[in-house]
Image (cartoon, helix red, strand yellow):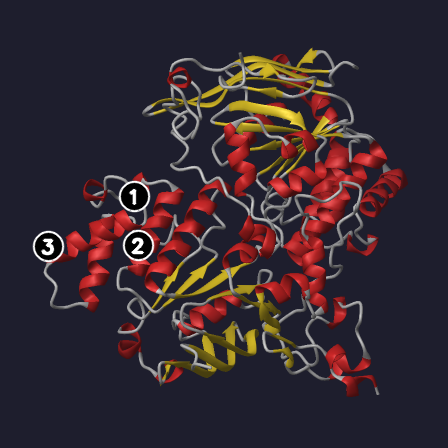
Amino acid sequence: MTQAILSIQNLKKFFPTKSGLLKAIDDISIDIHAGEVLGLVGESGCGKSTLGKILMKLEQPTEGKVLFEGNDITEISQSSLRAHRKNIQMIFQDPYASLNPRMTVSDIIAEPIDIHRLYQGAQREGKIDELLDTVGIDVSFKNRFPHELSGGQRQRIGIARALALSPKFLVCDEPISALDVSVQAQIINLLKKLQKDFGVTIIFIAHDLGVVKYLSTKVAVMYLGRIVEVAPADELYDSPKHPYTQALISAIPIPDPKMERSRDKLIIKGEIPSPVNPPVGCAFATRCPKAQSSCFHKRPALESISDAHKVACHLLSV
Amino acid sequence: MTTPLLEINNLNVHFSSHGKKLYAVSGIDLTLNKGETLAIVGESGCGKSATAKAITKLLPSFSSRISGDIHYEGRNLTHLNESQMQSIRGKEISMIFQDPMTSLNPVLRIGMQIIEGYRKHHPGVSFKQAQEYAIEMLQLVGIPNASERINDFPHTLSGGMRQRVMIALALACKPKILIADEPTTALDVTIQAQILNLIKEIQQKTQTSIMLITHDLSVVAGYCDRVLVMYAGKVMENASVYDLFYNPKHPYTQLLLKAIPKINMARDIPLLPIEGHPPQMTFRLEGCPFVARCPHAMKICKIKTPPAKKISNTQSCSCWLYYKESSS
């Protein structure tokens, strides 16, 4: 297999709080290959957004390495940060809050181009038109302000801005959760097209497992700052191995009344423990229907059960 | 057929601010039977929450105007004054809101919030009795150590726990109708499943009628009996959950169902988004509100609003496609 474009190694991020260290990311390792779409799923507070922020260098990790094409981005100095941002761009969750309300559409999209001094004059205008065309917004919108646009249009502008520097890697942090169903499909199709046409590698952070399956080639499930299972998307959904993944997939409502009512749902009891004081052994042990005494004492390592399928569960390792 | 518990005829809700009008709900009809779960689905701004708040009269009186009839047990709620409404709201008809973070009083212990409402509607009950009842309610919604937790403040609880408290609060007076406005939108999937199951369980015990307002069709599939699809302040389709999912009639419903990715869907099939945007609701719409985005739009659709057409006993649809004479 080719070398990973992004390799996360033993990454940790702890935030100090009044009641102790909050372990937002607790020893994560994962490789992402060029052209892959990695879906990152998990419930709120599991550390998925923090991971996205570390990749963008919006947060500095406590420990561990993030290698992008072989270079550790955690050691990039402020002065060479600009070059890094050319490689990795981000699409944010809230299209209402992530665009400057006082800038026009064309200024918003051109800002990265101007900062990096890529194009001037007619070339710059041409690039803006091209980007608008890519995301399916009419060129006549160039002089409008964000408040004149709908949520879906705003999210497209956010995507156009992220594409302005032709990044190799996109971090999408819940890009569709703030949008209506009919508009979500537009953005999902657009992301799919970008991936196909430009071959960008994407990390897609979401809590909607249906959308993640549709978009991703590989899915990582996070729980309390740890990765509990990684597998190719189809394999993960067809034969989830970790009890948490099983519960998570079982909890997704299916838009089909007969199927939805006839299946046995695995509803896990209880809530996510506090990341300030996570369980000693397996993070999921407190809610796991299959937990044994070893699960409460020893943390399970993420181990391969087949080529690309890794699980962190004592019950599966011999 | 029995008479419905709640019957709404030609409900209109208009807002006005800074001299501008907003037609949030335009002439909707709906019925809710005893023990039934009715879903109201639609995208943001389609008037589903405005409908709920019109029923409970929680809309600000200075900026909103409600017209039409809301019949509940022989009374027309639109004619009641605030003090009459207070004896119904919370006791007969209660509501769970979307955001459990902001809908509890942050400076009042959760037990007190239940006791307060319960004693208001049951004046003869002592504080002690009400407190015991509050503990019972919290146990019912699955809060562990309820006798100690009644003294907790909302900020010490997680989102799922707060939503449970909201449910306990809403059900404390054994209402006949529970309006749940996006009760699980702010929650995680595993917690969403817990809360929806809880609501369903309690409904089976108490025979409460539920009006579930949501934008998530997947939630509707598993938990509701009947579905009302709203668009731009109007009802597009009113059908049993099976008719709606397996035999949708209105073009909007059909497109909406195609726009959601299904878990068993092949990855190379593109989703079918609905192009365009919902109409501006700042003026009274003539014709079908969906006409601009509808693939089957005809001349008449722009001119006249289609009335609801009965397709079968369990399905009706507001679309000119189902009127034969419209083709002429």
Do dots 3 and 2 share one subunit? yes
Distance Cα–Cα, label 1 vs label 2: 10 Å
Amino acid type, label 1: Ile
x and y percent of residue A288 in the render?
Answer: 43, 29
At 78% from the left edge and 36% from the top edge, which residue is drawn?
A: A164
Residue under pointer 1: B143
Residue A162 can be seen, yes or no: yes
Q: Which chain is home to disc 2?
A: B
How busy is the neighbourhood of tag 1: few (under 14 within 10 Å), some, or many (20 plus)? many
Chain containing mark 1:
B
Badge 2 crowding class, 10 Å Cα cut-off, few under 14, some 14 to 19, many 20 or more, is many
Q: Identify the amino acid type marked 3.
A: Lys
- The residue tagged 3 is B128
Q: Residue B303 placed where, x, y %?
A: 74, 83
Judged from the image, the secondary structure of the residue bearing numbered disc 3 is helix
Horizontal side of residue A252 vs B102, given as left or right: right
Q: Earlier in the sequence, mark 1 or mark 2?
A: 1
* Location of residue B129 (image quadrant): bottom left
Q: Is residue A145 visible?
A: no
Label 3, label 2: how far apart the Cα atoms are = 18 Å
Q: Badge 2 is on which residue? A: B168
Q: Quadrant of residue B302?
A: bottom right
Q: Earlier in the sequence, mark 3 or mark 2?
A: 3
Discs 1, 3: same chain: yes
- Give SS at disc 2: helix
Percent from the top left, x then y, of residue A90? 67, 33
Of A140 and A318, nearer the camera is A318
